Image (cartoon, rainbow, N blue to C red):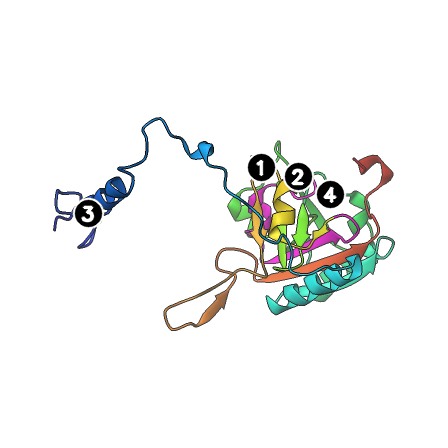
Amino acid sequence: MSTGPGMGPGVGVGPGSSKERVLGRVRRALSDVPRDEHPEDHPVVRDYLTTHGQHTPAESVDLLARNLSDYRAVVHHTDAAGLPALLSRLLAARGARRVVVPSGLSGTWLAGAEVHVVPDSASAALSPDELDTVDSVVTGCALAISETGTIVLDGSPDQGRRAISLVPDHHLCVVRTADQVVDSVPQALPRLDPARPLTWISGPSATSDIELDRVEGVHGPRTLEVILVAGDPRPASAYP
């Protein structure tokens, strides 16, 4: 069995290689398919359930909070009026002094916080080294999925570049419960633009080695705090 640079045994490309055997089986399996037939000629029936049970909006938010907590995210609840005070308190408890924010985040959210706000925008993008010096990042989100405890960012102005939510060690993410919480992934996908840079977050960054020793903060923030906001904390000018 042949090998090449960077390849171990079993991944050769010669006539007797594993690759050729697999491709041979694929060709034999397709041998009776007419040459003019295309995949779209046979629609796939998608009659699976889009959610596991029916939930009221309050139940969906409660399920989201429980699943986020299971993934070791820290969950907070507030209303729109209480958001700035909560953010100020959380940042103070963290000891955060320099906080990066995307260009489209409402300035009122951090108005009362005793921090140095570091804006990040397309015209003044922070380098990875600069992002590594900030204490926290505050963003909005595209939506949240209750059944999986997942937050999705799509690079919109209140979320910014993917890097600003991956490099800093502490991420505060704001979710509007009235219009940003869905029950399931099938409900989420039609609301997301696949052409945008989607980041799916289920808890703080974590990985395990072969001994299953968990290490957090390897390829993202070590601490994720999610604020579930009842009402709309955006100024009227930001409404779509």
Name the amino acid, label 4.
Leu
Q: Are marks 1 and 3 in contact (CB under 8 Å)?
A: no
- How far is mark 1 from mark 4, CA to CA? 18 Å
According to the picture, the residue beneath numbered tag 1 turns out to be 196
In the displayed structure, 27 sits above or below 65; it is above
Alpha carbon separation for disc pair 2 and 4: 10 Å
Residue 176 on the magenta segment: yes
* Residue 100 visible in this rendered orientation of the protein: no
For the image, the number of numbered tags is: 4
Q: Which residue is most to the top?
A: 36
Q: Quadrant of residue 197?
A: top right
Where is 28 relative to 214, above or below? above
* Residue annotated with mark 2: 156
Asked if the residue at tag 4 contacts the one at tag 1, i.e. Cβ–Cβ closer than 8 Å, the answer is: no
Q: Amino acid at mark 3?
A: Arg
C-alpha gap between disc 1 and disc 3: 38 Å
- In this view, the mark in front (1 or 2): 1
Q: Earlier in the sequence, mark 1 or mark 3?
A: 3
Counting residues from the start of the chain, the first of labels 3 and 2 encountered is 3
Q: What label does residue 105 carry, if any?
A: 4
On the image, the x and y values in percent for residue 88 come to 78, 58
Q: Secondary structure at mark 3?
A: helix
**Pointer 2 local density, CA inside 10 Å: few below 14, some 14–19, many at least 20:** some
Cβ–Cβ under 8 Å for marks 2 and 4: no
Q: Which residues are magenta?
A: 157-179
Q: 135 or 226: nearer the eye?
A: 226
3D distance between C-alphas at marks 3 and 2: 46 Å
Is the residue marked by circle 3 packed among few (<14), some (14-19), or many (20+) residues within 10 Å?
A: few
Question: Disc 3 to disc 4, how far (Cα)?
Answer: 54 Å
Proximity of marks 1 and 2: CB atoms separated by less than 8 Å = yes
